[in-house]
Amino acid sequence: MKKTLSIFTLLLFAFASCHKPETPADGGTPLPSHNDPVYHVGDYYHNDTLEGVVFFSYDGRNGLMVSLEEACLSWCEPNYVNSETGATNPYDGWHNTNILMSNYDLRHYPAIQWSHLRNTWHLAHQNYSITAYQWFVPSNDELRYLLQNQSEVNRALESLGYPTLEDKAYWSSTELGTRSAAALRVQDDSIIVSETLKNETLYVRAIRNF
């Protein structure tokens, strides 16, 4: 009887070990379980009040999504068009947005402020890392990648009843020199990058990690 109980105990222990969440060797946060949702480009992401459309996926469980809504705003107000901010990173929109948030009054930078105000509820109610989980204006390269996948993204936006990405110029957060910033649009199946005066009014979308 004791032998039978010992074998049964060992089997239970082995079963539990096989089904517990994997933990990194450094003791950090457990890796996602296999039951977590898997997202692909063009999928609608919805979690509590957080929603968007996936336009880049690292592994199906982490990636980038774009806001359902858009706005039509200037990069900065006319009185600030000659102010060089240093938000020149072509690859990392969060870096650019953080420079502007840290050093300037965002009321004078409407496109950046619009994306930042989307974070109010989530930062107040969720234990998110500030640097990893905020909406921000995409960099030049991040916006290019979004527009490269606009067909899949547009199908989701249209099915949800939101404006699609076609035939519009969008602000990036990448400043080009003193008076201009990079704006991108799709034209004849090509992505056109324009060096645009920062006080002009163009469309803007926010992106964020998921």
Image (spheres, rainbow, N blue to C red):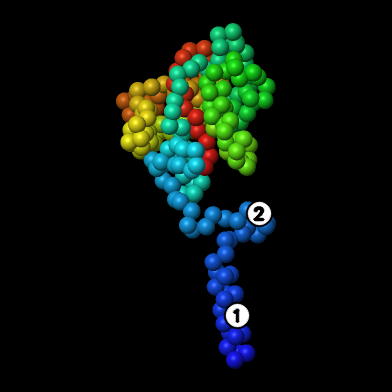
- Name the residue tied to disc 1: 9
Of the residues under marks 2 and 1, which one precedes in the sequence? 1
Quadrant position of residue 89? top right
Tell me if mark 1 has few (under 14), some (14-19) or many (20+) residues whose alpha carbon lies within 10 angstroms of its own: few
Question: At 61% from the left edge and 35% from the top edge, which residue is drawn?
Answer: 123
Quadrant position of residue 101? top right
Please give left or right for residue 43 compared with residue 177 in the image: left
Check disc 2 and give the amino acid type. Answer: Gly
Question: At 58% from the left edge and 70% from the top edge, which residue is drawn?
Answer: 17
The residues tagged by marks 2 and 1 sit, at their Cα atoms, a distance apart of: 29 Å
Residue 100 appears in the figure: yes
Task: Locate the N terminus by quadrant.
Answer: bottom right
x, y percentage for residue 198? 52, 14
- Name the residue tied to disc 2: 28
Please give left or right for residue 86 compared with residue 204 in the image: right
| Mark 2 secondary-structure assignment | loop
